Image (tube, rainbow, N blue to C red):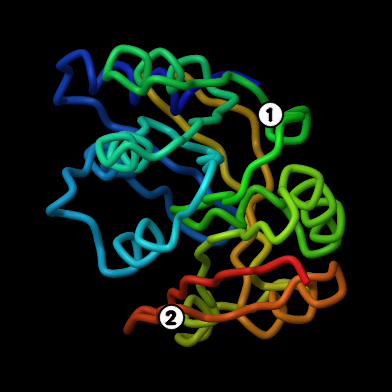
């Protein structure tokens, strides 16, 4: 896949504040994704992010680390954190910004084991679709030490259809996206938004115990999944 979002993130890091990352989707008009959301300072973290970071323990794998803002925060407190991303632009950004342990790889090919898997910014999205959740959880289990945990967030996007927008025939949290930056468009990819009920059902089937650690006013939640 073309590394569209990675190019935009690296350009922003290198000083281009005119960078605009467009996000095409399967449900409505094109969105503009603010690049600065990938470069938050610790004082700008949301309550959900702070809660997730406070629950990290042991060896941590930050999956889909993007510009590495969460990895850098954990690293600053001496945590043993590895930042994983398949984007070459994101990996270059993290290396330049001082993330010590960076791996460029699809999480499905990664082999090491950890005590905590951290997946923020709708981290469950990388599962792609509802049907792919069993494969996602099986891979996560292979990345965890005994007693390990997942910390991930998502949201129930039923609100998108509250004003009369017709729900799709498939699960409404299954969205297709593609990035556009500097007049170049990437490939379409699947991204999953998952309500907590569906998450709990899939997690239990995979051998995880789920605890909702935080919810906010925008139907977003943080979940901890512990291996039973």
Residue 103 visible, this angle: yes
Separation (CA) of disc 2 from disc 1: 29 Å
Q: Is residue 183 visible?
A: no
In the image, residue 148 above or below residue 198: above
Residue at (41% x, 62% y) in the render: 52
Q: Nearer the viewer, residue 9 or 60?
A: 60
Reply above or below: 10 against 38.
Answer: above
Query: What is the x, y in percent for residue 54?
Result: 35, 61
166 vs 66, left or right, is right
Q: Which numbered disc, 2 or 1, marks the residue that appears first in the sequence?
A: 1
Which residue position holds label 2? 219
Residue occupying image coordinates x 30% and y 12%: 96
Judged by depth in the image, the label closer to the viewer, 2 or 1, is 1
Which mark, by number, is residue 151?
Answer: none
**SS at mark 2 in the image:** loop
Residue 100, horizontal then vertical, whole percent: 39, 20
Density class for disc 1 (Cα within 10 Å; few <14, some 14-19, many ≥20) is: few
**Could you say which is closer to the camera, residue 222 or residue 90?**
222
- Element type where label 1 sits in the image: loop
Other residues around mark 2 within 10 Å, as few (<14) / some (14–19) / many (≥20):
some
Q: How many marks?
A: 2
Q: In the rendering, which numbered label is found on residue 106?
A: 1
Q: Residue drawn at (46%, 78%), measured in percent from left and top?
A: 213
The C terminus lies in quadrant = bottom right
* Quadrant (top left/top right/bottom left/bottom right) for the N terminus: top right
Compared across the picture, whether 71 is left or right of 35 comes to right
Q: Quadrant of residue 152?
A: bottom right
* Residue occupying the point 48% across, 87% down: 162
Q: Position of residue 224 (x, y in %)?
A: 56, 70
């Amino acid at each position: 896949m073309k590394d569209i979002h990675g190019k935009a993130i690296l350009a922003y890091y290198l000083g281009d504040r005119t960078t605009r990352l467009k996000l095409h989707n399967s449900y409505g008009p094109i969105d503009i994704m603010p690049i600065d959301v990938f470069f938050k300072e610790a004082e700008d973290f949301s309550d959900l992010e702070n809660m997730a970071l406070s629950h990290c323990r042991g060896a941590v794998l930050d999956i889909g680390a993007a510009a590495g803002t969460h990895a850098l925060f954990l690293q600053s407190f001496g945590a043993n954190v590895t930042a994983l991303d398949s984007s070459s632009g994101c990996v270059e950004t993290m290396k330049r910004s001082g993330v010590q342990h960076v791996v460029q790889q699809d999480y499905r090919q990664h082999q090491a084991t950890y005590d905590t898997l951290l997946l923020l910014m709708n981290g469950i999205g990388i599962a792609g679709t509802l049907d792919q959740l069993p494969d996602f959880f099986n891979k996560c289990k292979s990345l965890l030490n005994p007693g390990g945990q997942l910390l991930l967030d998502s949201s129930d996007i039923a609100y998108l259809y509250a004003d009369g927008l017709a729900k799709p025939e498939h699960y409404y949290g299954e969205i297709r996206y593609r990035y556009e930056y500097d007049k170049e468009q990437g490939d379409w990819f699947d991204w999953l938004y998952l309500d907590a009920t569906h998450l709990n059902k899939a997690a239990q089937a995979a051998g995880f115990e789920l605890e909702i650690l935080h919810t906010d006013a925008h139907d977003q939640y943080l979940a901890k999944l512990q291996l039973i």
